Image (cartoon, rainbow, N blue to C red):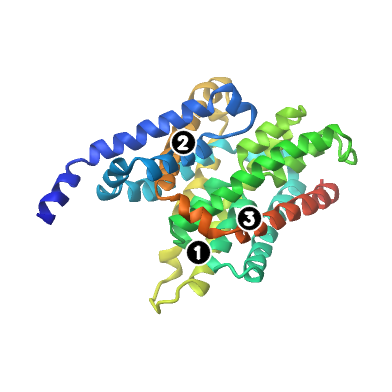
C-alpha cells in the first residue's frame, strides 16, 4: 500500500512542478504592481510569503510538493541556476565606476558584518548555523544570500525562514529610514552620489537599494555599489565552504575542500565576465537579452523562494523568540555606522 502511494506521488511530479512555477509567476506579477515596486518589495520576498501561506493553509498542496521531491529540486538545482544567472546583472564596468574604494567598502562590509554576526550569535546563545544564515543575509544580498549560504551550511528551513524574516524587517526599515534621514538633513555630510553608495553598501536586498536610491534620485550609485557587494558572494561562499568544513562537520565524516566548494559561485563569476563583454552591452543586448535573462533569473529564484516558504511554519517564528531579531538589529546598526565611516574614508 505504501509503495502504491509512493508511485502515485512519483507520477504527479509534473503537476507539482507546475504548481511551483505558477506560484512563482504570481509572485513576480504581484511584485510588478506599483505599490510593491514603490516600497521595494521584491518578487523574492513575495514568493516567500506566498509559499508560507501555502505551507500553513493549503495542506494538500504542501503534501504534494513534499512527497514528489520537487521542493528539494527547487531549493538546490533551481536555486543554484538562479544564483549563476544573477551574475549577468553585474559587469566589470560597474567595478571600474566605483574603483578600488568601492570594492574595499563592499569587502569590509561583507566580512566584518559576518564575523560580528558570529560573535553576536554566541553572545545571544543562538546556534552557529542560525547565526551564519542571519549574518549572511545582512552581509551581502538578503534572501538570495541566505539561500546560497544554506546550500553550504544545511541549516534547514526553520533557520532559513528566520534569517529571511530578519532581512525583510530590517531591509525594509532601512529602505524607508535612509531617504527620510537624507531629506531631513541628518546625513548632509554626504553628497548625493555618496549617499547612494552608502545605501548600496548597507541595505539588505537589491530591491531595497533600488527603491531607496530612486527615492532621492541617487539610484545609479546605490545600485552600482550594491552590485559590487553582491559580487562578494563568490569569495564569501568559497570562504564559507572552507569555514564549514572546520566548524560544522561534527559527524567525523571525511569531506574534502574540493567536495565542499560551491562551484555555482564560480559560474556566477563567469556569468559576470560574459556580461561584461561589449557584445552584451549594446542597447539591443541590454534591452532584449539581458532583460530576458533577468526575468528568467527572477522567476527561477522565485521558484526557490516559494519552495522555501512552503517549509516555513508559523510556529517556527513564534518559537524563535526575539533574540534573532535583536541580533539582526545590532547588525543593522553596525551596517549604518560602518557604512558612514567607510564611504567617507574610501570614497
Q: Residues at badges 3 and 1 in contact (C-beta under 8 Å)?
A: no
Q: Secondary structure at mark 1?
A: helix
Neighbourhood count class around disc 2 (C-alpha, 10 Å): few under 14, some 14–19, many 20 upward: many
Q: Which mark is residue 38?
A: none
Q: Secondary structure at mark 2?
A: helix
Kindly report the distance in space between the C-alpha atoms of the residues bearing marks 2 and 1: 24 Å
Q: Position of residue 159 (x, y in %)?
A: 50, 58
Q: Residues at badges 2 and 1 in contact (C-beta under 8 Å)?
A: no
Give the image quarter of residue 228. Answer: top right
Vertical relation: 320 (above or below) 191: below
Neighbourhood count class around disc 1 (C-alpha, 10 Å): few under 14, some 14–19, many 20 upward: many
Vertical relation: 239 (above or below) 317: below
Residue 323 lies left or right of residue 279; in this view the side is: right
- Mark 3 or mark 2, earlier in chain: 2
Residue 311 lies left or right of residue 194; in this view the side is: left
Q: Position of residue 221 (x, y in %)?
A: 73, 35
- Mark 3 or mark 1, earlier in chain: 1
Q: Residues at badges 3 and 2 in contact (C-beta under 8 Å)?
A: no
Q: Which mark is residue 325?
A: 3
Q: Which mark is residue 241?
A: 1
Vertical relation: 66 (above or below) 15: below
Q: Is residue 8 visible?
A: yes
In the rendered image, which residue does mark 2 sit on? 297
Amino acid at each position: 500500500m505504501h509503495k502504491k502511494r509512493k508511485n502515485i506521488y512519483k507520477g504527479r511530479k509534473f503537476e507539482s512542478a507546475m504548481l511551483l512555477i505558477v506560484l512563482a509567476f504570481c509572485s513576480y506579477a504581484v511584485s510588478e504592481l506599483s505599490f510593491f515596486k514603490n516600497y521595494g518589495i521584491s518578487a523574492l520576498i513575495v514568493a516567500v510569503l506566498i509559499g508560507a501561506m501555502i505551507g500553513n493553509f493549503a495542506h494538500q498542496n504542501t503534501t504534494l510538493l513534499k512527497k514528489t521531491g520537487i521542493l528539494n529540486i527547487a531549493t538546490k538545482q533551481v536555486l543554484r541556476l538562479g544564483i549563476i544567472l544573477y551574475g549577468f546583472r553585474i559587469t566589470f564596468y560597474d567595478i571600474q565606476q566605483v574603483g578600488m574604494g568601492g570594492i574595499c567598502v563592499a569587502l569590509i562590509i561583507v566580512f566584518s558584518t559576518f564575523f560580528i554576526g558570529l560573535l553576536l550569535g554566541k553572545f545571544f546563545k543562538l546556534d552557529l548555523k542560525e547565526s551564519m544564515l542571519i549574518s549572511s543575509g545582512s552581509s551581502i544580498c538578503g534572501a538570495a544570500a541566505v539561500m546560497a549560504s544554506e546550500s553550504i551550511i544545511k541549516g534547514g528551513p526553520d533557520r532559513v525562514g528566520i534569517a529571511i524574516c530578519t532581512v525583510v524587517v530590517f531591509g525594509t526599515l532601512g529602505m524607508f529610514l535612509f531617504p527620510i534621514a537624507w531629506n531631513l538633513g541628518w546625513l548632509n555630510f554626504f553628497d548625493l552620489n555618496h549617499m547612494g553608495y552608502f545605501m548600496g553598501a548597507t541595505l539588505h536586498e537589491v530591491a531595497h537599494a533600488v527603491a531607496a536610491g530612486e527615492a532621492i534620485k541617487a539610484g545609479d550609485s546605490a545600485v552600482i555599489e550594491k552590485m559590487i557587494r553582491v559580487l562578494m558572494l563568490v569569495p564569501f561562499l568559497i570562504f564559507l565552504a572552507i569555514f564549514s568544513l572546520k566548524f560544522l562537520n561534527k559527524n567525523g565524516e571525511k569531506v574534502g575542500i574540493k567536495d565542499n566548494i560551491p562551484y555555482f559561485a564560480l559560474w556566477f563569476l563567469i556569468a559576470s565576465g560574459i556580461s561584461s563583454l561589449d557584445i552584451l552591452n549594446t542597447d539591443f543586448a541590454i534591452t532584449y537579452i539581458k532583460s530576458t535573462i533577468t526575468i528568467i533569473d527572477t522567476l527561477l529564484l522565485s521558484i526557490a523562494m516559494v519552495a522555501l516558504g512552503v517549509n516555513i511554519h508559523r510556529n517556527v517564528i513564534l518559537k524563535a523568540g526575539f533574540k534573532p531579531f535583536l541580533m539582526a538589529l545590532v547588525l543593522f546598526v553596525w551596517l549604518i555606522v560602518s557604512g558612514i565611516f567607510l564611504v567617507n574614508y574610501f570614497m
